[in-house]
Image: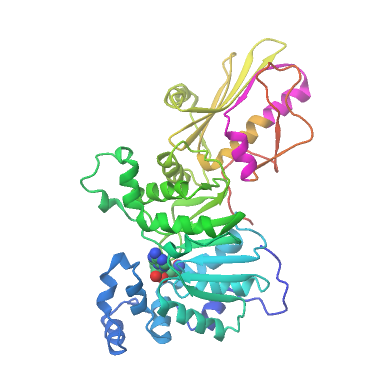
Amino acid sequence: MKPRTDNRPKVGPKDFLASLGIKRPPKGGVFTQRLWDDIKSRGGDPEARFQGDGFHAAANDMYFIDPVIARRVLSEDYERWCRHIKDFTTVEGFPPKPGAIAEIGCGVGILSLWLARQYPEATVSGFDWSERALEVGRLFAKDLNLANVDFAQKSFEDLADTPTGTFDLVIAYHAFDMERTRRVAGKAFDYSELSESALDELSDQMMHAMRAMARLLSGDGVGVICGKWDDVGLLCLFHSIRKAGLGTNWSATLWNGQEKCSGGEEKHYIFVRKGIPHIGASPWEDARALLTCGEYYGRNVELDHKLLESYVALFTPGETLAHFEFQYDSGGIQRLRLLKRAGLLLLEDCTTLGFRRGFLHSMASIAEMFAIVLRHEAEKQAKSVGKITKNVRAERLMPYLFAVGAMEEADDNVSDRRSSGSAQTGPSARGAPHAGPRRTRRT
Ligand SMILES: C[S@@+](CC[C@H](N)C(=O)[O-])C[C@H]1O[C@@H](n2cnc3c(N)ncnc32)[C@H](O)[C@@H]1O
């Protein structure tokens, strides 16, 4: 993240929240009868919380009826605020120096306020359809002396009509309901049976939100989505991402799976941009890819060599992303294949002389896994002990890797002149690739 350019003292998440009067929640939690009574006595309607899965404007108007109630309600999310604020500086994928930032479904805009404070030279716009929540946000901005943040009442639908995208960073945190499984009841045995129109119907607000995000983002602006989801919700999200003309950056996207964060929630951020080709074949594969990100988070699963053959059989009806073969002058051929199926990757490394190795990864490791194939290619060329006999890549692999910045075209061509006609121009990998666990955090 960019170094601070102002002279104000560095403020951590806790001090920042304290300056807004947001504290750790009391032992029994915030949502007690006393809160509902206090809201009612101030003219609010506690029953509004049962409307629209809590994502309704009326519910927000009730939670943020005045700053005193707002502070109490916001305290419930104390741990979550601390984590999100910290993650802005520790998770890879956020633009290093955003000039214009937007938050859709911002509520009172705690994160917008933090970003405005963190980037004094940036302008931050928070959008929500709940005027009461925005009013509290404006008051907080005044309290913090922040002139570079504003809040406007706009629904996702309104924002989808925005004429041009100018924002470098657009965030949507817990802004829409992604827990959709109960809504599928009676529609399908298996989620892969859900039709396009069933997905459209299930996606409703998500679709509007993703269209809004696509409209707000500049050409290379980064969109970040975070919120609780179930598997159908995830499917709908990727369906909406695709329909809005956005693509997922798997190198930055992260779910820490089983690892719970303080406050109980798992950590996940989905990074999207315009102009990223889809590396997954469908929203189903995207959703499975995210789920396997969690399953394989921080793990490098080497298959027992006795299992490799059966795994290769499972993967071969899928897609071959890269296939490299090298024939040694001394005899014997080495083959490296990067296979993809159902959001998972299998990297196979074997020789006709009986050497066999295989690694399972989530699709999020695609750049690292392909870099291993490239490294082999470069090593073989350097040693000049044979010739490359096959070097094929799936058509959309390179455009995807270039678009997410995982690879850059090098001046030198790593493909061997002696290789077969199927060899292609080689890119160079950024950084030093390794077969170890994927690390998405900056340290
Ligand atoms: C659960 S709150 C999350 C607020 C904040 N982003 C956070 O992380 O706490 C969801 C917010 O999204 C807003 N919202 C939901 N649907 C919306 C829509 N269609 N247009 C605008 N805002 C919407 C709600 O008013 C609410 O403030």
User: In this rendering, does residue 115 appear at all?
Assistant: no
x and y percentages locating residue 271 in the rendered image: 53, 52
Q: Does residue 379 appear to the left or right of 68 in the view shown?
A: right
x and y percentages locating residue 326 in the rendered image: 66, 18
| Residue located at (42% from left, 50% from top) | 240
Q: Does residue 17 appear to the left or right of 317 in the view shown?
A: right
User: In this rendering, does residue 8 appear at all?
Assistant: yes
Q: Is residue 381 magenta?
A: yes
Colour scheme: rainbow
Quarter of the image that includes the C terminus: bottom right
Q: Is residue 307 magenta?
A: no
| Residue located at (26% from left, 53% from top) | 182
Where does ligand 1 appear, by image quarter? bottom left
Instruction: Classify 6 as above or below 400.
Output: below
x and y percentages locating residue 298 in the rendered image: 53, 46
| Residue located at (57% from left, 34% from top) | 396
| Residue located at (77% from left, 22% from top) | 383
Q: Quadrant of residue 426?
A: top right
Quarter of the image that includes the N terminus: bottom right
Which of the pair 44/245 is nearer the observer? Answer: 245
What stretch of residues is rendered in magenta? Answer: 375-404
Judged from this view, the residue extending furthest toward the top is 331
Which of the pair 230/177 is nearer the observer? Answer: 177
Which of the pair 188/326 is nearer the observer? Answer: 188
x and y percentages locating residue 329 in the rendered image: 72, 11
Judged from this view, the residue extending furthest toward the left is 186
How many circles with numbers are drawn on the protein? Answer: 0
Instruction: Classify 357 as above or below 275.
Output: above
